[in-house]
Image (cartoon, rainbow, N blue to C red):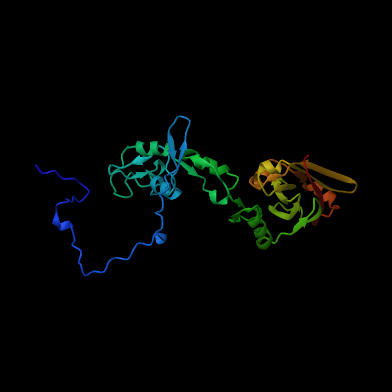
Amino acid sequence: MTNFKLGKKQTFASSSCDVQPTSMMEPPSSPMNLNSVKPKEQVQPQSAVNLPHGKSSFILPNSDIDELLECPVCKNAMFPPIQQCPSGHTLCFSCKNKVNNKCPICRKEIGHIRCLALEKLATSLHLCCSYHCLGCKEMLPYYSKLQHETQCIYRPYTCPHPGSDCPFTGDIRELLSHLRQCHKLDLQVGSTFHHRYVKQDPRSVDNCSWTLTLFNCFDRYFCLHFEAFVLGCEPVYMAFIRFLGEESEARKFNYCLEVGGHGRKMKWQGVPRSIRTHHRVVRDSHDGLLLHRNLAIYFSGGDQKVLKLRVSGRIWKET
């Protein structure tokens, strides 16, 4: 019986076909220069996270994970129940109906097969946050990654300018540059301010909203938001301060706003809201200085054609 060893070529010491004779006329090879020999690069072992139950959860590069657990239809990460066709191709459950129950790769009927092996594999994986390049150092279980990224403090900020649906995103420094260059906003230094708000035809009910200006104080940035909108059937005016940063930082500050005329005055004191919170959410919660149209016209001097309001305010740090 002849035995074969798979995967390697077998050689025998007595076999003359593997021995190449050395010619006596060939010059001897030059001696090896040991200084020129570079040490062989060591292969770094794959890192792992030790879990309390004694098992290891391997950390793979995001590119590998994206390829392994990415749905071929929507290109998003797959979560249970992960569907599988008879050929082994996988896709997410929500895309199953989009492809009419046909595998997008081999076109076979998908049926009701779950890829339990892939689901179990995902539970053993820890990944870095998608905002790792922006400073986040968290290593996250696969099934917690998306939830973390929706609240990650390193995720980019969206443009807070309410006058348009601006698609710009970036960090605070990029956001400031964008607001000043693209939206032509002024930057005021100091914790106190005085602004005049002028609106033609104050009895009109058309919605208009914009950020008046930016403030730099206490080494932080704020923006004053003033908006006219309809509350019920009556136009109202609202002003509030927003903080360029996280909500936890915004709560360290307070502000007050004042508007008045003819010996009368209205004052509002509150806490700035983070620009993470959409301005419509702040508006609809009435978290700011709210002024009805008739009172605004009275403060303006009773002019029915032009509304002129003087808004004063101050920002201070909570101690």
Q: Say which of 194 and 65 sits in front.
A: 65
Residue 233 placement: quadrant: top right
Give the camera-side residue of 210 and 59: 59
Q: Nearer the viewer, residue 131 or 161?
A: 131
How many marks the image carries: the answer is 0
Q: Position of residue 304 (x, y in %)?
A: 81, 54
Quarter containing the C terminus: top right
List x then y, in percent, for residue 64: 41, 48
Q: Does the image show residue 232?
A: no
What residue do we see at 65% from left, 45% from top?
246
The picture places residue 306, in percent across and down from the top left corner, at 80, 57
Of residue 156 and residue 308, the one placed in the foreground of this image is: 156
Q: Quadrant of residue 161?
A: bottom right
Tell me the quadrant of the picture where the N terminus can be found: top left
Q: Residue at x 39, y 38 (%)?
A: 121
Can residue 312 be seen? yes
Question: In the current view of this chain or complex, which residue is farthest to the right?
Answer: 263
Position of residue 50 relative to residue 178, above or below, is above
**Could you tell me residue 311's position as x and y percent?**
81, 51
Q: Is residue 189 above or below residue 52?
A: below
- Residue projecting furthest to the top: 53
**In the image, is 26 to the left or to the right of 152?**
left
Q: Is residue 6 left or right of residue 128?
A: left
Identify the residue at image location x=26%, y=69%: 27
